[in-house]
Image (tube, rainbow, N blue to C red):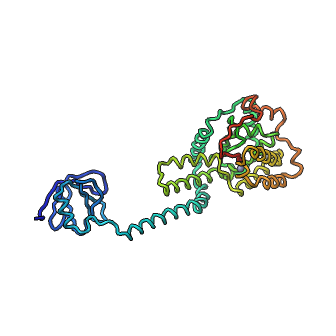
Amino acid sequence: MAAGLTAQGRYFDGASARPHPVTVSLTDRLAVSGPGISRDWNLLDLRATETVPPLTRVGAAGEAARVEFSDEALAAALAARCPDLYRRESRGGTLRLVLWSVAAGLSVLLVAVFGVPVLARLAVPLVPDAAETRLGRAVEEQVVRLLNEPPLCTDPAGRAVLDALVARLAGAAPDLPRDVAVSVRRNGLANALTLPGARIVVLSDLIAKARSADEFAGVLAHEFGHAALRDPTRSLIQASATSFLLSLVLGDLTGSTVIVAVGQAALSAGYSREAERAADAYAVALMNRVGGNGAALAAILERIARDEGEDDLAFLRSHPFTRERAAAIRAQAGPEAEAKRILSEAEWASLRAICGPDAAKPEKSRRRRPGSDARP
Ligand SMILES: [Zn+2]
């Protein structure tokens, strides 16, 4: 006789993980009752979920509430009376599920590839100043870590010249979001990075590679351009959103992908050709305005491209448009620019020694990380 089987069990309401002790009774329906709980399920609606025997866990299809019990007689009786208890999705259902998963994955990829750049562009003006400042600090920490903590260069005389140069450029620079913070770190990469919140990190080999103050100032002015056009914030939103979406597809939701991607993007992902052209144009106009040689930027870009090209093709691969950029810079600067000097020779000598007297010469054995490139 199957009527009137009863067992003790635990009821989960589907909203919280808290088990409620209940009595489970099987008649022509399945009744679940306990303090404050009274359920009465139609046997045709019942579905079991995967459990380790002797535990049985059942609930009505389409409902989150479940009851579980370990009484094997009740489980057997239930299985005998509920034709659909262990029904799995039919083959068609499984296939449909797989297709839906693939479609969802593809749509996330499409959003990552086509939607994210557009969304990043739209999102940038909405990022509050305070958030951008915090983002900049966090990214700088990450970048410094990725570069193996290169020491800050703080020689007082060099720092004073740099501060005056930064103030002079900033005084004539339009659209800067806020005060620019420029730091110099001793590192064998000829690079300058603009991070969100107008934070510019200069790596000392850039100063060593510069043959004049105007070359260095030109790169600095170019980075001011990126800051004014808010390229770093846009590219970081893009990189983190893309890797966030990819981590959804690939199932890695630890967040580590996102953090690493943000740091990597700040270090090595080049901006678009349009962004570089715009920053170049900004730099030349700014150098002209403060009485420097705007054409010097073209010279240092060509030198970095050439020197990097001797070791590996990293820079040339990510900047295949150096020649075109150099021509545009020289045309905009005009022929009279070449004669202008932004600093005196003495000031430039002090600035070159900002990392100490020996750092002014290019390092012989430069430790370059593979995949990292110069991106002024
Ligand atoms: Zn650039």
Q: Position of residue 229 (x, y in %)?
A: 68, 53
The quadrant where residue 343 appears: top right
Between 375 and 54, the one nearer to me in the picture: 54
- Comparing 350 with 95, the one in front is 95
Q: Is residue 224 visible?
A: no
Horizontal placement of 313 versus 83: left or right? Answer: right
Given the current orientation, which residue lies at the most extreme left position?
Answer: 1
- Is residue 66 shown left or right of residue 204? left
- Residue drawn 52% across the image and 64% down it: 106
Q: Quarter holding the N terminus?
A: bottom left
**Residue placed furthest toward the bottom:** 92
The location of residue 316, given as percent across then percent down, is 73, 51
In this view, the residue in front, 153 or 169, is: 153
* x and y percentages locating residue 6 in the rendered image: 14, 58
Q: Quadrant of residue 191?
A: top right
Looking at the rendered structure, the number of numbered marks drawn on it comes to 0
Q: Is residue 113 above or below residue 143?
A: below
Q: Is residue 154 above or below residue 114?
A: above
Residue at 49% x, 48% y is: 255
Image quarter of residue 119: bottom right
On the image, the x and y values in percent for residue 30 come to: 19, 64
Residue 239: tell me if it is visible: yes
Left or right, 246 with reference to 271: left
Q: Is residue 198 above or below residue 78?
A: above
In front here: 172 or 328? 328
The reply, left or right, for residue 114 in relation to residue 351 is: left
